[in-house]
Amino acid sequence: MNPLDGLVVVSLEQAVAAPFATRQLADLGARVIKIERPGVGDFARGYDETVRGLASHFVWLNRSKESVALDLKSDHGRSAVAALVSRADVFVQNLAPGAAERLGLGVQALRAANPRLIHVSISGYGGDGPYANKKAYDLLVQCEAGLVSITGTEDEPSKVGISIADIASGMYAYSGILSALIQRDRTGEGVTIEISMLEALAEWMGYPLNYAMYGGTPPARTGARHAAIAPYGPFRCGDGEQVFLGLQNEREWATFCERILGEPALAFDPRFIRNSSRVEHSAQLQAEIEQAFRDSTAEEVAERLEAAGIANALLRDMAGLANHPQLQARGRWREYESPAGTLRALIPPATFVGGEPVMGRIPEVGEHTDAVLAEFGILSSAALTDSRG
């Protein structure tokens, strides 16, 4: 038995944020009915064709779901969605601001018909305020949340390489739904949940926000290095490769000086005697460390760091991640089906010992329309036309 077996989720979703949230639910056993546009479906299906003709984003976010294609510009499409939601536990939508309300699928209408419904809306900036109707794409929210301003190098700011604002809001939608299920079990009533991408990402900006609000200046952009901890980041080795390392306290710093640098006295050098001093003299610190690494390869340095109990990592690319020995040793990969054949993916990070995530098939657009509508006693558009004829 999976934790969410029997839970019915209807999702009017697209792109990343809402599909990310509902895929977590599907992995745990929830039945996720994904409403898509007839023909083209979720526009994320067309982002690229890299996974044997399928889009990499869509493959990532949409396994284990049922696809129902409905034209929401039609009375039939809107009434069909409302009928599905009337028997659902959870409704999730991340349409443009105000779109769900204009379709008659706003919270008041749906929860009036189904008081136990958990109604979840994900938007860029929230349902009110001066930015309520502003278009919100991941990069733009990263900018508005200040993330781009502290990411990159001294010379050039940079966005994060994944859709982090979408993922943050999707994770808060997912955890919010789980919390709402507990509350509903106690009260018998559903709840309304609103998630803003800006507010989700702003929560993740807590450290730099506090640093700037109370320290007077924001953390500097330092590339792969840490703006407030040293040494913490990449260091060049004799083979031209980099090893990444991080120290968290003065005990580790003393160990590092003695066992890795071979200079115990350096721990008491006034330039490096405490973390704030090391940050202030980070260029000199880097020179000392890279001088000690000049005759070793990155892998050799990593082995020495590991033996000394110093946190370290080698820089892996996507091929390195796909073949990571730790993921392989822990059996984290599974195969699952798609319209392009058998694919493989990592199982969800939250491991239920003794359980197995669903990892179901990725659907074609509208693959389940007729079956789902028939199950819920809803006439298909074709049947409705015939009955009127």
Image (cartoon, rainbow, N blue to C red):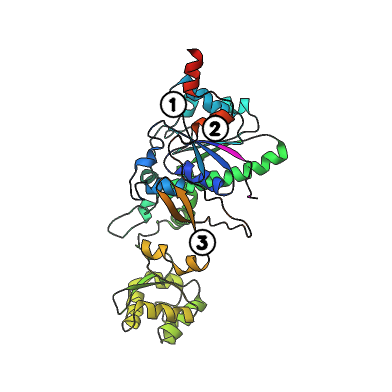
Where does residue 348 sit, x and y in percent of width and height? 53, 55
- Measuring 30% from the left and 80% from the top, which residue is drawn there? 238
* Residue hosting label 2: 372
**Which is nearer the eye, 230 or 367?**
367
* Residue hosting label 1: 71
The numbered mark at residue 332 is: 3
Residue 279 shows in this picture: yes
Left or right relative to 239: residue 326: right
Left or right relative to 163: residue 120: right
Q: Quick one: label 2, few (<14), some, or many (20+) residues within 10 Å?
A: some
Q: Quadrant of residue 10?
A: top right
Secondary element at tag 3: loop
The answer to whether residue 54 is magenta is no
Q: Which residues are magenta?
A: 1-9
Q: Quick one: label 1, few (<14), some, or many (20+) residues within 10 Å?
A: some
Q: Looking at the picture, does residue 109 appear above or below residue 226? A: above
Marks 2 and 1, Cα distance to the nearest angstrom? 15 Å
Q: Earlier in the sequence, mark 3 or mark 2?
A: 3
Residue 254 shows in this picture: no
**Which is nearer the eye, 52 or 274?**
52
Left or right relative to 55: residue 128: right
Q: Amino acid at mark 2?
A: Val
Q: Quick one: label 3, few (<14), some, or many (20+) residues within 10 Å?
A: some
Overall secondary structure of the magenta section: loop
Q: Amino acid at mark 1?
A: Asp
Q: Amino acid at mark 3?
A: Arg
- Measuring 64% from the left and 49% from the top, which residue is drawn there? 3
Q: Looking at the picture, does residue 154 appear above or below residue 18? A: below
Marks 3 and 1, Cα distance to the nearest angstrom? 39 Å
Which residue extends farthest right? 186
